[in-house]
Image (cartoon, rainbow, N blue to C red):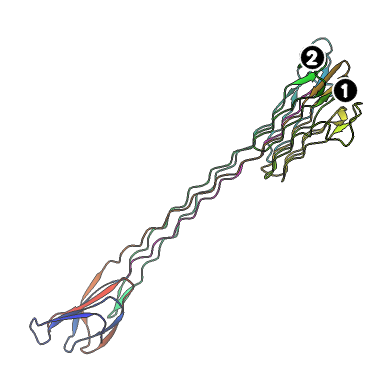
């Protein structure tokens, strides 16, 4: 029995007219005496376009540079270079953010003491924005329907979805702060004379930079403290170890003791510069060795020429670079288009013959004939 619904009307002639519609595939059996028919059909609708790809995440910012330690140095007339006892610079950030250094003013006509200005580390460079996601693929054309040697094409495929917006770039890590306070026993341009542990040094850059230490001053010997550790890409840098728990034995107060450094955060944070009583003990902060890691802060300077005893504080470690934001999802693909019907008239057929009809999903074929 043929698939579809058939309608026959006695409209005159030897063979009455009729029609048969196929919504699914089947076989058309030509009524006896029918030699010419008309066929109208349509293929299936086009397939929807693909979803657009998500945008790429923004690139992270670089780590900040470590701040310099505070300098304490002697000058001679007309010579801008300090006599030893100077502080040390900070370390550069993981992507090259400039470390803080120490600037010294030229001394006037008589020998004098000048405290170098500690420069803070530079903010790390910002990352670059991510890339916009690629558009989705266009949908494919719908399947064709066929019958009586005629082909009825499917609808056009839908347009692909738009690519997702790119993620925003990450900001660079903050530079470590170079402290600008000197503690001393005898000097009118210093803070109130103080003996014992001194207040903290330069603050660490945000986020994650360790703070520099304040130092320790006895009556005749000054010990400058280390710089803070630079932030690692994951963990924060350490602040300067406190006095005197940093040593298994108490310092001898002879100026030779080394104040251990402040470790940088992991991975990649720069080690803080060394502090101590001897100029040879002091060291520069280490550079960050991972792109988002901060440099270590420089060790502070100290000057031991009793009764003029000075202590410069350690610089802060650089902060880590911030990660970029994730990209946004892509847009959905558009629906495919409906197929456009086509009609063929006066198609010859063999009376009583059987013809296969192939109907695409959601397509149709209609065959009709006039009285003959």
Disc 1 and disc 2: Cα gap in Å? 24 Å
Reply above or below: 34 against 135: below
- Image disc number at residue 42: none
- Nearer the viewer's eye, disc 1 or disc 2? 1
Residue named by callout 2: 107
Q: Which quadrant does the C terminus fall into?
A: bottom left
Sort mark 2 into few (<14), some (14-19) or many (20+) by Cα contacts within 10 Å.
some
Query: Quick check: marks 1 and 2 in contact, CB under 8 Å?
Result: no
Majority secondary structure in the magenta region: loop
Reply above or below: 218 against 251: above
Residue 46 image position (x, y, % from top left): 35, 65
Magenta stretch? 44-71
Residue in view at x 49 percent, y 55 percent: 53
Of helix, strand and loop, which one carries label 2?
Answer: loop
Q: Quadrant of residue 27?
A: bottom left
Q: Is residue 62 magenta?
A: yes
- Image disc number at residue 221: 1
Residue 58 image position (x, y, % from top left): 56, 45
In the image, farthest residue toward the left: 12
Q: Which quadrant does the N terminus fall into?
A: bottom left
Of helix, strand and loop, which one carries label 1?
Answer: loop
Residue 123 image position (x, y, % from top left): 64, 33
Q: Is residue 202 magenta?
A: no
Residue 315 image position (x, y, % from top left): 74, 30
Sort mark 1 into few (<14), some (14-19) or many (20+) by Cα contacts within 10 Å.
many
Q: Is residue 105 left or right of residue 206?
A: right
Q: Earlier in the sequence, mark 1 or mark 2?
A: 2
Q: Quadrant of residue 273?
A: top right
Residue in view at x 22 percent, y 90 percent: 352
Reply above or below: 43 against 286: below
Q: Is residue 27 left or right of residue 130?
A: left
138 and 170: which one is in front? Answer: 170
């Amino acid at each position: 029995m043929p698939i579809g619904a058939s309608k026959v009307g006695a409209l005159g002639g030897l063979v009455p007219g009729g029609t048969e519609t196929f919504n699914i595939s089947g076989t058309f059996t030509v009524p006896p005496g029918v030699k010419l028919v008309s066929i109208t059909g349509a293929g299936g609708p086009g397939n929807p376009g693909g979803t657009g790809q998500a945008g790429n995440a923004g690139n992270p910012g670089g780590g900040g540079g470590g701040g310099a330690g505070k300098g304490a140095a002697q000058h001679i007339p007309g010579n801008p270079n300090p006599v030893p006892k100077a502080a040390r610079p900070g370390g550069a950030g993981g992507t090259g953010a400039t470390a803080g250094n120490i600037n010294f003013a030229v001394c006037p006509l008589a020998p004098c003491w000048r405290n170098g200005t500690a420069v803070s580390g530079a903010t790390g460079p910002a990352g670059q924005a991510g890339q916009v996601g690629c558009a989705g693929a266009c949908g494919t054309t719908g399947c064709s329907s066929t019958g009586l040697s005629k082909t009825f094409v499917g609808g056009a495929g839908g347009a692909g979805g738009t690519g997702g917006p790119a993620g925003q770039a990450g900001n660079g890590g903050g530079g470590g702060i170079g402290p600008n306070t000197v503690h001393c026993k005898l000097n009118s341009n210093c803070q109130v004379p103080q003996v014992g542990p001194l207040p903290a040094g330069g603050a660490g850059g945000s986020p994650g930079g360790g703070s520099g230490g304040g130092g320790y001053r006895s009556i005749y010997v000054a010990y400058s403290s280390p710089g803070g550790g630079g932030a690692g890409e994951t963990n924060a840098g350490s602040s300067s170890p406190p006095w005197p728990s940093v040593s298994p034995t108490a310092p001898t107060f002879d100026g030779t003791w080394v104040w251990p450094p402040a470790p940088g955060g992991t991975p990649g944070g720069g080690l803080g510069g060394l502090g101590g009583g001897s100029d040879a003990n002091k060291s520069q902060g280490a550079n960050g060795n991972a792109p988002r890691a901060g440099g270590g802060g420089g060790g502070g300077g100290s000057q031991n020429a009793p009764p003029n005893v000075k202590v410069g504080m350690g610089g802060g470690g650089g902060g880590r670079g911030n990660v970029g934001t994730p990209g946004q999802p892509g847009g959905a693909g558009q629906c495919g288009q409906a197929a456009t019907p086509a009609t063929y008239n006066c198609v010859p057929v063999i009376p009583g013959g059987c013809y296969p009809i192939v109907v695409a999903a959601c397509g149709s074929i209609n065959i009709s004939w006039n009285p003959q």
